[in-house]
Image: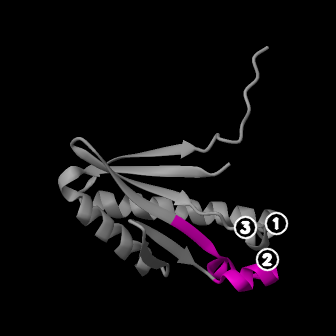
Amino acid sequence: METTTEYTVRDGDRCTAVELAGAALRAEGHRVEAVDGRLVVTGGARVLTALLGALVPPTRQYQRYDLELSEAPGQAVLTLRPADHGAAVAGGIIGANRRRAAWQRTTTLLETTLHEGGVLLHRTDRIDTSGITLYDR
């Protein structure tokens, strides 16, 4: 299960929040690119991760996230989602643990950056339950 993290920011500070998030991610070594109204954030080496899996140093393991801004009355929400890595760059259980640790570092980085920038109202973590079937008994 993947997690989605939402950062609610003041409506008047939405541009500042996006700029702060992009700058923080770049400072951590991620590549940040604007695509179709969202930021695509990548880090590490995809080919190296696909070829060597768990043998790739943790700092070079491929990561990809989508950061999207949506608006609601009086507030804006920055939503960070892990993008599909594909099985070739999963790296087995070691790779999965590394991806989870990288996700936690990234979500904490964004929370800290937005909080220190004075634009964060609150953070909400969500679990993707789309693949879970519920049965009535």
Q: Residue 86 has which mark?
A: 3
Q: With respect to residue 71, does 137 lie above or below?
A: above
Q: Which one is in front, 53 or 94? A: 53
Q: Which one is in front, 43 or 72? A: 72
- Amino acid carrying label 1: it is Gly
Q: With respect to residue 36, does 32 lie above or below?
A: below
Instruction: Say which element carries label 2.
Output: helix
Q: Which one is in front, 112 or 14? A: 14
Instruction: Say which element carries label 1.
Output: helix
Question: Which quadrant does the C terminus fall into?
Answer: top right
SS majority, magenta: helix
Residue underneath mark 2:
53
Closer to viewer: mark 1 or mark 3: 3
How far apart marks 1 and 3 lie (CA) works out to: 12 Å
How far apart marks 2 and 1 lie (CA) works out to: 7 Å
Residue appearing at x 67%, y 81% in the figure:
46
Q: Which residues are magenta?
A: 45-65
Furthest-top residue in this view: 137
How many neighbours does mark 3 have within 10 angstroms: few (below 14), some (14-19), or many (20 or more)? few
Residue underneath mark 1:
92
Furthest-left residue in this view: 12
Q: Are marks 2 and 1 in contact (CB under 8 Å)?
A: yes
Q: Position of residue 43 (x, y in %)?
A: 56, 78
Left or right of 56 in this view: 11: left
Q: With respect to residue 119, does 58 lie above or below?
A: below
How many neighbours does mark 2 have within 10 angstroms: few (below 14), some (14-19), or many (20 or more)? many
